[in-house]
Image (tube, grey):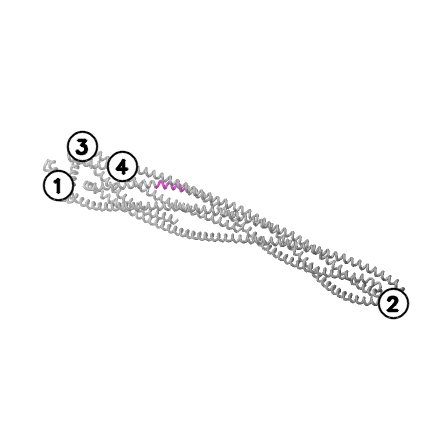
């Protein structure tokens, strides 16, 4: 039963361990799902931002395409309009050069878009492969989960079967206990009955002892009387000899004197004496018959002694069997000691397991503390995000202010000089934007692939969560039922153990009582044997006395036969002798009465012996019944030993199953370690990628800073140029007034115009410190183009292009800033995930 208790405890511990492992697995899966959801949300945000950027870039590309188309149309129109002026042809040539450059850039953008499409296809193939791998991994996880569920259900079934078997065993033990209680009551009744019989036998034996003491005293008295009789007989012999001598003399005298007178009287007396002698002979024969009967009784008593010896031999056999049973009990005790040692070892193992559980609880507490720290960090992150949002609002306000200022600046950019000066910078910016477009298209492709992977993983995780929730609910229901059954079985088991302990105590008491009874029996047997030996000795003494009496009687008969002839002659002496004989007859009658009393006491003793023999037979029967009960108990003990061996085998099987489960758990731990290693590798790759992105962002920020410095320089130059343009306008206005005045005086308009054109170069060198010869030519060409064509279609287009380029620059700077922040956040999230995985 102790082994059964230990088995039930071990099974409970195994169930608790499986429950804790399932809870840990569920928690880990939930944490993984939460991390994946976070990464998916981050990727979605990044995807939205990149989509916005792509839309803006597509708009800019569309505007550039429209500008190129309009430029081509203008070039065609200008080609139709070209007649003969070399200046117009030069302007058209320049425009064609610009258009060819824009077309080449557009073609490059188109080729890059084709490359990006190819890369997207490759990434889609890689995503498909990853999806297949993920499906395989999920299938493996499902198989492992199903195997865990199957093992759990099999363990529960085995536990239930074992509980049913233990319940049946407990019922059998209860029945046995009831039978033992009944046998105990029966044995107690028998014990009380035997006690009464022994008390009665002891009383009878005390009476027999008293009677034996009386017989011994009587025998001593008889011996004393015999000695007196011997002395009297010797005296009487002497007297008889003296009387004989006297009788001779008297006979001689009587023969002489009274021979005739006394003959008749003597004859009558002789006849009387003969009759008396015959009566004495008859009495002696009766005494012989009585002595023969006494001898036969003594022989029967000796045979009874042999029967008692046989009974003692059987008792010795019973003692030997009891010794064998004691030896077997010692062996069983040794086996119980071994089993107790095993139970102590198991208890030590349980204590070690409990200590490991305490350590595990400490680790769980540490994990909870770390989770609290993580929550605090998350709150800090949210606070930082609010601060960032506020900063972004401030940045938006500043950007609005910058837009207002840029619009003011754009009003001044209507002039050709600044547009021609900014064209190379615009080419550089377009190239930088192309590189940015390429990089962002790559990033978009990667993000799309990651988003698709994450969406698939999210769907699969949702399905897996639903299944795990259902399984957990079912397992909780099963656990509740099992706990109820275990409580019921524990209550029953406690009752059974109490009953069994009571029965064991009662059995111990019975065994003690049996031992005491056996000791009493042995003492009684010893007393009985001692009494029998004393009675035999007394019988021997009495036999010897009887033999002596017989010898003396024979001697007396011989003497009496020899003296019978003499007695005929002695009449007077015979009378006296007759009186003595009468006295002796009285004594003999008294002795007869005593002998009758002795015979009656002897008969009573014989009856008591017969009763004792019957009691011994009853005791032998009871002893056989007790031996049968002992055999049954031994058989039951053997059955219990067999059941214990079966339980040991079951324990071994369960230990093997637990070893298999532990091996599987180690395999799962290895797989977890492999997953952790893979996650570490992925995290390292992501960190490398983030470092590369950081370097790239740093390069872009440095480029933007340099571009901003260049823009500031260009702004200063622009202000100086605007001042010079204002001065030139004033000079032109003054020259136009002069020309008008001259036109009033003269009617040759063409010459005045030529004179005005000739005057312009004279006034230019004064204020053209920062203008080169090409700029001068461009100014002359633009002046001619304005004067000839009077078409202002190029200026608004250039304004629109410049505005969009500025917007793209601002948006790029904002995106770079946001990208840096998001990269930092991603690194923190990845680090948090890695820490959580490593802490797990």
N-term mark: 4 or 2: 4
Magenta part of the protein: which range?
A: 450-462
Q: Identify the secondary structure beneath mark 1.
A: helix
N-term mark: 3 or 1: 3
Q: Which mark is residue 81?
A: 3
276 or 656, nearer to the observer: 276
Q: Residue placed farthest to the left in the image? A: 745
The residue singled out by tag 2 in the image is: 253
827 or 9, nearer to the observer: 9
Query: Left or right of 372: which side holds 280?
Result: right
The residue singled out by tag 4 in the image is: 111
Query: Left or right of 61: which side holds 335?
Result: right
What is the CA distance from the residue labelled 4 to the residue labelled 2? 199 Å
113 or 56, nearer to the observer: 113
The residue singled out by tag 1 in the image is: 761
Query: Left or right of 367: which side holds 324?
Result: right
């Amino acid at each position: 039963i102790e082994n059964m208790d230990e088995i039930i405890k071990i099974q409970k511990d195994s169930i608790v361990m499986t429950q804790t492992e399932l809870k840990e697995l569920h928690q880990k899966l939930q944490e993984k799902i939460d991390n994946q959801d976070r990464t998916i949300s981050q990727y979605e945000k990044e995807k939205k931002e990149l989509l916005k950027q792509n839309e803006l870039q597509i708009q800019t590309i569309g505007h550039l395409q429209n500008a190129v188309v309009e430029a081509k149309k203008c070039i065609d129109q200008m080609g139709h309009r070209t007649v003969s002026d070399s200046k117009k042809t030069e302007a058209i040539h320049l425009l064609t050069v610009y258009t060819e450059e824009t077309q080449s850039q557009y073609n490059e953008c188109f080729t890059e878009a084709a490359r990006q499409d190819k890369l997207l296809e490759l990434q889609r193939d890689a995503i498909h492969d990853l999806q297949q791998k993920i499906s395989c991994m999920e299938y493996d996880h499902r198989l492992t989960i199903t195997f865990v569920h199957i093992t759990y259900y099999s363990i529960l079934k085995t536990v239930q079967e074992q509980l049913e078997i233990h319940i049946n065993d407990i019922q059998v033990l209860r029945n046995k206990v009831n039978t033992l209680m009944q046998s105990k009551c029966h044995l107690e009744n028998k014990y009380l009955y035997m006690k009464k019989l022994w008390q009665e036998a002891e009383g009878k034996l005390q009476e027999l002892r008293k009677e034996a003491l009386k017989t011994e005293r009587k025998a001593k008295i008889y011996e004393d009387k015999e000695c007196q009789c011997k002395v009297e007989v010797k005296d009487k012999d002497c007297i008889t000899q003296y009387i004989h001598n006297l009788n001779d003399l008297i006979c001689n005298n009587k023969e002489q004197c009274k021979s005739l007178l006394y003959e008749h009287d003597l004859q009558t007396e002789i006849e009387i004496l003969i009759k008396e002698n015959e009566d004495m002979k008859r009495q002696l024969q009766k005494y012989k018959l009585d002595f023969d009967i006494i001898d036969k009784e003594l022989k029967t008593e000796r045979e009874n002694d042999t029967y008692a010896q046989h009974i003692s031999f059987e008792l010795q056999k019973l003692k030997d069997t009891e010794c064998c049973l004691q030896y077997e009990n010692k062996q069983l005790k040794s086996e119980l000691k071994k089993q107790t040692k095993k139970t102590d070892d198991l208890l030590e193992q349980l204590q070690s397991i409990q200590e490991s559980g305490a350590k595990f609880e400490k680790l769980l507490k540490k994990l909870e503390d770390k989770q609290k720290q993580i929550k605090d960090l998350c709150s800090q992150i949210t606070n930082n995000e609010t601060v960032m949002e506020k900063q972004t609002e401030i940045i938006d306000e500043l950007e609005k202010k910058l837009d207002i200022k840029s619009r003011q600046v754009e009003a001044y950019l209507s002039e050709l000089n600044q547009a021609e000066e900014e064209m190379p910078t615009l080419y550089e910016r377009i190239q930088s934007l192309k590189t940015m477009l390429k990089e962002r298209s790559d990033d978009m492709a990667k993000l799309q692939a990651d988003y698709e992977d994450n969406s698939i993983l999210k769907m699969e995780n949702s399905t897996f969560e639903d299944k795990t929730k259902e399984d957990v609910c079912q397992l909780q229901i099963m656990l509740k039922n099992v706990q109820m059954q275990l409580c019921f079985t524990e209550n029953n088991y406690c009752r059974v153990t109490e009953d069994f302990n009571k029965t064991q105590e009662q059995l111990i008491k019975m065994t003690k009582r049996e031992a005491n009874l056996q000791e009493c029996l042995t003492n009684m047997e010893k007393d009985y044997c001692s009494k029998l030996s004393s009675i035999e000795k007394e019988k021997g003494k009495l036999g010897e006395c009887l033999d002596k009496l017989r010898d003396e009687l024979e001697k007396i008969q011989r003497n009496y036969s020899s003296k019978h002839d003499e007695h005929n002659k002695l009449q007077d002496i015979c009378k006296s002798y007759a009186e003595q004989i009468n006295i002796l007859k009285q004594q003999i009658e008294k002795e007869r009465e005593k002998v009758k009393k002795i015979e009656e006491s002897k008969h009573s003793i014989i009856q008591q012996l017969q009763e004792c023999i019957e009691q011994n037979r009853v005791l032998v029967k009871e002893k056989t019944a007790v031996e049968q009960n002992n055999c049954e108990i031994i058989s039951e003990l053997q059955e219990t030993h067999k059941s214990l061996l079966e339980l040991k085998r079951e324990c071994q099987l369960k230990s093997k199953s637990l070893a298999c489960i532990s091996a599987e758990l180690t395999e799962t731990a290895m797989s977890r370690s492999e997953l952790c290693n893979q996650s570490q590798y992925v995290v390292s790759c992501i960190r490398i990628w983030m470092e590369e992105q950081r370097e790239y962002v740093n390069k872009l920020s440095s480029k933007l800073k340099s571009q901003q410095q260049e823009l500031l320089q260009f702004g200063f130059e622009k202000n100086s140029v605007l001042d010079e343009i204002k001065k030139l306008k004033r000079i032109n206005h003054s020259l136009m007034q002069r020309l008008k005045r001259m036109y009033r005086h003269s009617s040759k308009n063409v010459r005045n115009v030529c004179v005005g054109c000739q005057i312009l170069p004279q006034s230019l060198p004064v204020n053209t410190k920062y203008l080169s010869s090409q700029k001068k030519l461009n100014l002359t060409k633009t002046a001619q183009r304005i004067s000839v064509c009077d078409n202002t279609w190029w200026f608004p287009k250039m304004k629109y292009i410049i505005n969009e380029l500025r917007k793209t620059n601002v948006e790029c700077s904002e995106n770079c800033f946001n990208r840096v922040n998001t990269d930092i956040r991603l690194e923190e999230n990845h680090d948090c995930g890695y820490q959580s995985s490593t802490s797990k």
